[in-house]
Image (spheres, helix red, strand yellow):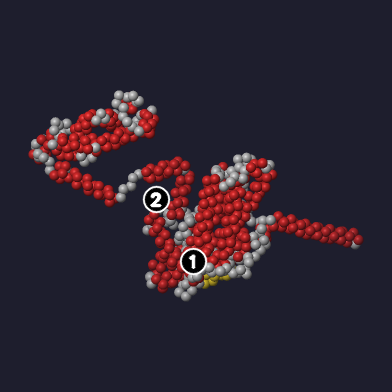
């Protein structure tokens, strides 16, 4: 793998800051996609299993893999650059550790989906386990793929199942190789990495649940917040005006009666 | 019935897997739309969740399908619950099958026990983080302890744990409420089995628990870790022999020595204990002018026999002197002396051996390969009883080769006559 070091070395810290931000965005994306994949994977073999679910799994998996490949290239090239300043390196290592954990989860889930595909073939739907679930996972898949709505019109073909299985075997071994490769190329000392966050995380804020119903593309969120803040300001000003009018009126009433 | 008593995962693991697969077949049979379980609805306040069944339903179905008695059905059903294929809805921590109106539900295949990827610490940490984020203070005491422990152990990836927990929660918020409840119950049931509250061996025999305990112990004590690695390395280096081959060797040995065994063959001229004639002992004493025929025959059995017999050793020495390789046997004898001699004299003896046999330009220099020589010279700096072992073994094999050579065999045969 060619080292992309000359360009990075010549950049000032602004360049590496951008690289860091890019890396962080990619890793955040991967974490989201891995979570969605896990969610969809837990439905395989249950009564909500269908061709559509399998197709959604495939699309989510492809997205996860693309992200993984780009993150791998991005982080490997930066971490192998010896001129990276110490602080940036620490941040990159944090991203690295998060990336490898995410990859681990993805790998396990892919293996599970593959082996369950063996046991539960959609051709024999009488054997699907009745787990009490009623809805499909389309919204979750949409969240993973950052799409407003999955293209329902495109009905997945039946032949896709066997094709997907053989692709899956290849993809699983590809992820395997990636994990091995990573460990060989970059030496991150895990015991030196310190996380940022606290041990106990805060509960999900209400804005999170509000934004869930809508698109969850990362670029959208910063745009969202100023908008809601803006509307809050307007409401506040209107209320203040109303209160002001009310007090002046009452003062007048008191004054003139 | 199942116990954790062997490190070897092979046979016992296979046995477990077969049991799980059988249980899974039962579960799949229960899904049959015509002949399967009768499903009911679970009513929670305003939500209705389908696919529930009572314990009584399960027992009755098992009795009817497999033509067994109630006791056996209770046992089989109990196993299904204990290994997480069915989970209770009212009291999630009580993993027993009650033959009454207690509701149960099927676990999703993703969480089946036989999916060969054991629950990892990362997974457990994410689950606990999720539980904590969902409702602060909902973690039980033992869960809080484990959470802190995990926080220490996989501290480097803690940001990931928290972020993944949040993302998983956000993903599940996309589902309707009924589905969310089911998903939470499924996950809770899975973890109650894979990380049971009380770490007692009676709850769950499985590779998972064993590995958890073992990895716990190994991680906490780095010393134990090294000891474990060392013992594994030594175990790998040991020779393994099939028991059939061992027994064959034993039989061969017995056949070979049968004629030489005084109890089996009788001893000539007569048994001293019976006849009071000590001729037998005199003839077989350590140094005699003429060794008995049987004795000389034994020399041909193995090289060790020859060396251990004083007369044999003497004969061999004579032969070596003729070949100008006597120093080898002298060296070997000196090493034996060090190994079996007095502790106080060891240092002096090692010095002598070095002066006579190993030092460059020594009078009776022995030919040892460079690697062994280096190792021995290193060891001589801190002499102990077994410091010469490697060199002695090397010379032993050298002499053994010479013993095997035809010349010496002819010599021995001539002596036999």
Which of B372/B17 is in front?
A: B372
Circle 1 chain: A
Judged by depth in the image, the label closer to the viewer, 2 or 1, is 1
Report how far apart the C-alphas of labels 2 and 1 lie in the structure. Answer: 33 Å
Instruction: Please state the horizontal and vertical placement of residue B370, each as a whole percent of the image.
Output: 37, 32
Residue shown at 47% from the left, 54% from the top: B198
Q: Secondary structure at mark 2?
A: loop
Instruction: Please state the horizontal and vertical placement of residue B167, each as a whole percent of the image.
Output: 61, 57
Instruction: Please state the horizontal and vertical placement of residue A38, each as a whole percent of the image.
Output: 56, 59
Circle 2 chain: B
Asked if marks 2 and 1 fall on the same chain, the answer is no
Find residue A61 and report its image quarter.
bottom right
Residue shown at 53% from the left, 63% from the top: A164
User: In which quadrant will I find the C terminus of chain A?
Assistant: bottom right
Does the image show residue B344?
no
Which residue is label 1 attached to?
A: A120
Q: Callout 2: few (<14), some (14-19), or many (20+) C-alpha neighbours within 10 Å?
A: few
Find residue B279 and report its image quarter.
top left
Specify the label residue A161 is tagged with.
none
Q: Callout 1: few (<14), some (14-19), or many (20+) C-alpha neighbours within 10 Å?
A: many
Does the image show residue B398?
yes
Which residue is label 2 attached to?
A: B7
Q: Is residue B233 above or below residue B387?
A: below
Residue shown at 57% from the left, 68% from the top: A156
Instruction: Please state the horizontal and vertical placement of residue B295, each as a whole percent of the image.
Output: 17, 38
Which of A237/A148 is in front?
A: A148
């Amino acid at each position: 793998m060619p080292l992309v070091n000359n360009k990075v070395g010549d950049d000032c810290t602004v360049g590496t800051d951008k690289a860091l931000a890019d890396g962080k965005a990619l890793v955040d994306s991967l974490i989201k996609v891995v979570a969605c994949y896990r969610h969809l994977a837990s439905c395989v073999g249950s009564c909500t299993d269908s061709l559509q679910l399998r197709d959604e799994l495939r699309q989510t998996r492809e997205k996860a893999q693309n992200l993984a490949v780009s993150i791998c290239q991005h982080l490997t090239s930066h971490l192998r650059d010896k001129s990276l300043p110490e602080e940036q390196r620490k941040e990159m290592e944090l991203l690295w550790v998060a990336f490898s954990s995410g990859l681990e989860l993805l790998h396990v889930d892919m293996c599970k989906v593959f082996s369950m595909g063996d046991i539960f073939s959609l051709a024999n739907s009488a054997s699907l386990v009745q787990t009490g679930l009623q809805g499909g996972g389309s919204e979750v898949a949409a969240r993973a793929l950052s799409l407003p709505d999955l293209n329902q019109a495109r009905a997945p073909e039946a032949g896709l199942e066997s094709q997907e299985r053989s692709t899956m075997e290849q993809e699983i071994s590809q992820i395997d190789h990636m994990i091995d490769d990573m460990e060989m190329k970059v030496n991150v000392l895990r015991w030196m990495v310190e996380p940022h966050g606290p041990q106990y995380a805060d509960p999900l804020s209400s804005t999170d649940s509000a934004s869930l119903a809508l698109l969850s593309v990362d670029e959208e969120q910063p745009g969202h917040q100023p908008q809601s803040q803006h509307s809050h300001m307007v409401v506040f000003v209107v209320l203040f005006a109303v209160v002001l009018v009310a007090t002046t009126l009452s003062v007048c009433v008191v004054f003139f009666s | 019935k199942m116990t954790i008593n062997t490190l070897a995962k092979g046979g016992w693991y296979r046995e477990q897997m077969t049991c799980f697969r059988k249980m899974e077949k039962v579960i799949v049979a229960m899904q049959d739309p015509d002949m399967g379980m009768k499903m009911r609805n679970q009513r929670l306040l305003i939500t209705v969740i389908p696919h529930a069944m009572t314990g009584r339903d399960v027992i009755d179905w098992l009795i009817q399908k497999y033509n067994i008695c109630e006791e056996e059905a209770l046992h089989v059903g109990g196993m299904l619950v204990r290994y997480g294929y069915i989970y209770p809805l009212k009291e999630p921590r009580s993993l027993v099958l009650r033959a009454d109106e207690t509701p149960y539900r099927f676990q999703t295949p993703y969480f089946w026990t036989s999916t060969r990827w054991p629950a990892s610490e990362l997974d457990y940490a994410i689950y606990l983080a999720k539980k904590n984020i969902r409702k602060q203070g909902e973690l039980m005491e033992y869960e809080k302890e484990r959470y802190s422990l995990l926080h220490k152990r996989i501290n480097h990836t803690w940001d990931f744990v928290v972020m993944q927990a949040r993302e998983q929660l956000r993903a599940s918020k996309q589902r309707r409420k009924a589905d969310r409840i089911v998903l939470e119950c499924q996950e809770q049931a899975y973890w109650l089995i894979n990380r049971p509250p009380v770490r007692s061996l009676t709850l769950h025999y499985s590779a998972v628990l064993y590995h958890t305990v073992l990895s716990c112990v190994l991680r906490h004590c780095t010393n134990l870790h090294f000891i474990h690695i060392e013992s594994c390395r030594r175990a790998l280096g040991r020779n393994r022999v099939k028991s059939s081959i061992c027994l064959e060797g034993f039989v061969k040995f017995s056949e070979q020595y049968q004629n030489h065994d005084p109890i089996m063959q009788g001893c000539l001229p007569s048994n001293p204990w019976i006849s009071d004639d000590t001729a037998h002992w005199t003839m077989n004493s350590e140094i005699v002018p003429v060794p008995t025929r049987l004795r000389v025959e034994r020399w041909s059995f193995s090289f060790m026999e020859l060396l251990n017999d004083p007369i044999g050793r003497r004969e061999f020495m004579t032969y070596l002197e003729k070949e100008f390789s006597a120093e080898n046997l002298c060296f070997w004898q000196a090493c034996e002396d060090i190994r079996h001699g007095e502790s106080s004299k060891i240092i002096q003896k090692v010095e002598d051996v070095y002066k006579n046999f190993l030092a460059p330009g020594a009078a009776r220099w022995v030919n040892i390969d460079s690697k062994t020589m280096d190792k021995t010279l290193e060891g001589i700096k801190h002499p102990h009883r077994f410091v010469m072992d490697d060199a002695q073994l090397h010379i032993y094999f050298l002499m053994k080769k010479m013993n095997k050579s035809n010349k010496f065999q002819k010599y021995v045969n001539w002596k036999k006559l």
